[in-house]
Amino acid sequence: MGNKNKITLHFDHVFWPNVELLGTVASTSYSCGYFLNLHKATGNPVLVYMAAGRFAYDLETLSKEDATKFAMVQLKKMFPEAAEPVQYLVSHWGTNPNTFWSASPTKSMQSNIILLAPKISASITNNGY
C-alpha cells in the first residue's frame, strides 16, 4: 500500500490532447506527478493530478485552494493558456482515517479508472465542487 493524493480539476472545455496521461517533469523525483485524462473515459472535461509517496503527504498540508493552484501551475507549464477549473476536488486520502491510505494493488489501473470515472464525475457535480 502507498499514498496518493488526487486533485480533480473540472473545466468548462477540453484544451489538452486526447491522450490518457499527461506527464510532468520536475527537477527531482520527489515532486513528479501526472494528469489522468478522464475526458477519454467519461466525455467530461476533467483532469486528475496524481501525486504519490512523501510528496502526496506534503500536498495534503496545503489548503484545497493552494493544492489546486499547485496542480494548475504544473498544468500551465504544459498548456500556458489553460483555463481555470470551474470545480475542483482534493482527496486528502493519506490523512483521512476512513480511507486507510489510498492505494492498493489492482488488476488494471485503466479498468479502475473506467469504473470510477462516472462516480467521480457524479460526485463532483452532486457536491458542487
Image (cartoon, grey):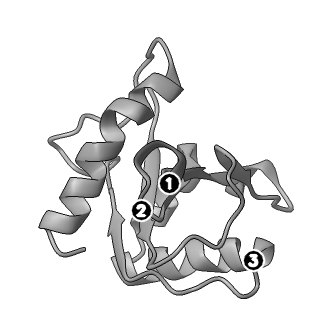
Camera-side mark, 3 or 2: 3
Nearest the eye: 68 or 118: 118
In the figure, 78 relative to 102: above or below? below
Residue type pointed to by label 3? Phe
Q: Which residue is mark 2?
A: 8
Residue type pointed to by label 1? His
Q: Give the x, y percent position of residue 77.
A: 78, 76
Q: CA distance from mark 3 to mark 2?
A: 17 Å
Q: Are marks 3 and 1 in contact (CB under 8 Å)?
A: no
Q: Give the x, y percent position of residue 17.
A: 72, 59
Going from N to C along the chain, the mark reached first, 3 or 2, is: 2
- Which disc is residue 39 wearing? 1
Quarter placement of the N terminus:
top left
Identify which residue is drawn at 65% across, 52% down: 34
Q: Which residue is mark 3?
A: 79
> Mark 3: few, some, or many residues within 10 Å (few <14, many ≥20)?
few
In the figure, 37 relative to 68: above or below? above
Q: Is residue 120 visible?
A: yes
Q: Name the outermost residue toward the top.
A: 107
What is the secondary structure assignment of the residue under circle 2?
Answer: strand
Q: Name the outermost residue toward the right.
A: 27
Identify which residue is drawn at 35% across, 37% down: 102
Going from N to C along the chain, the mark reached first, 3 or 1, is: 1
Question: In the displayed structure, does residue 111 sit left or right of residue 81?
Answer: left
Going from N to C along the chain, the mark reached first, 2 or 1, is: 2
Nearest the eye: 39 or 71: 39
Question: In the displayed structure, does residue 29 sit left or right of residue 60?
Answer: right
